[in-house]
Image (cartoon, rainbow, N blue to C red):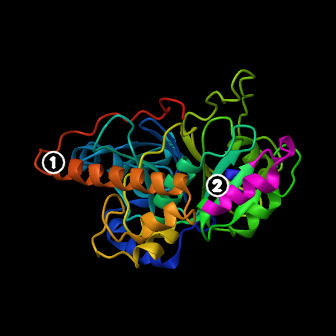
Amino acid sequence: MDASSLSLEMLGWSAERESEFAKWRAEKLEPGRVVIEDKQNYTLFTRLGVLEGRASGQLLQAARSQAELPKVGDWVAVEPRPDHKKALIRYVLPRTTKLARKVPGRPSEEQVLATNVDVAFLVQSFDQGLNQRVLERMLLSVREAGIKPVVVLNKCDLSRTVEEVLAQARNSAGDAPVLAVSARTGKNARHLFDYIKPGQTGVLLGASGVGKSSLINRLYGEEVATVTPVRDSDAKGRHTTTWRELIVLPQGALIIDTPGLRQFQLWVAGEGLQETFPEIFELAAGCKFRDCRHEAETGCAVKAALEAGRLSVERYQNFLKVRREIEALEQARLKRQWKPAGRPKRERILEDSDE
């Protein structure tokens, strides 16, 4: 969509946000939304048009971590220099939602993937095979962030076991919709619009090679995202998207494209754990002890269901692994609270190692 035809309202700006912006307008600042983040370079959409942005020194000094700096989807208060098509980002406005993961290899560092998101499309592909462990982690994080999840299984045209894989995905997805689509042929791709309306923001999450960019091109109606073929040897994709970008679809919905997530380590979890493993929490109500950890305790209803074959070994093992991961993360956070905050490190956009 041509940037000249856009307005802030089309990007999700509301009367409520306009009212809240009064204090920044008093400083002669203008609102804008981050549409591209490439390391610490930003492309912003404002009422003055598209501007190149950078964070002010004050914002950099005030940020306790990279997570507090501008990310794709953020609304920001900027000091514009329209004559030079540039702007200085002074403030990041409060976020309605924040989707984040733990930085791989760094026990207590958060990486924000996208902000102010309404719907997350969790994309896997039939040719790479369903990874239920990764899917469950994504579902947990998305739900904890207050974002609606939709599971998308792409490349259904390459599979002879579509219904079998769909059943496996639904077992992990709970109440989240599960779609089998083909970006190449277009089969069922338009059904994604059933879950995202004009003015709402969605994000595509998934590993390299699952077809996120192809899906965006299919939804847009023409090629706006670069596609790189997967390797024949292992069906893994090479990185195409090395930045995060917000794209306005012709029907008015907004989609954030992201680099391939080869790992997805949890950053936050609370009620999302129960929503992702509801059957285990339902069984736990029958445990003898209220603080049962479902490992070696007597009278454990979860273990009894496991032994009786009413609970799958894979779901049970992944539940324990996710819970341990959450507990380790909380311990790392407690340790970090006693360390002085330093200047945010430069964030690495390209991801690190294959699942």
Main SS class of the magenta portion in the image:
helix
Closer to the chain start, of discs 2 and 1, is: 2
Front tag of 2 and 1: 1
Of the pair 319 and 126, the residue shown nearer to us: 319
Q: Could you say which is closer to the camera, residue 338 or residue 23?
A: 338
Determine which quarter of the picture holds residue 253.
Answer: bottom right
Left or right: 186 with respect to 97? right
Q: Amino acid at mark 2?
A: Ile
Instruction: State how far apart marks 2 and 1 are (Cα).
Output: 37 Å
Where's residue 262, x and y in %? 53, 36
Q: Give the SS element for disc 2.
A: strand
**Disc 1 residue type (three-letter):** Lys
Up the image or down, 187 lies above or below 116; here it is: above
Q: Is 278 contained in the magenta span?
A: no
Range of residues picked out in magenta? 154-171
Q: Which residue is mark 2?
A: 255
The correct choice, above or below, for 55 with respect to 226 in the image is below
Mark number, residue 335: 1
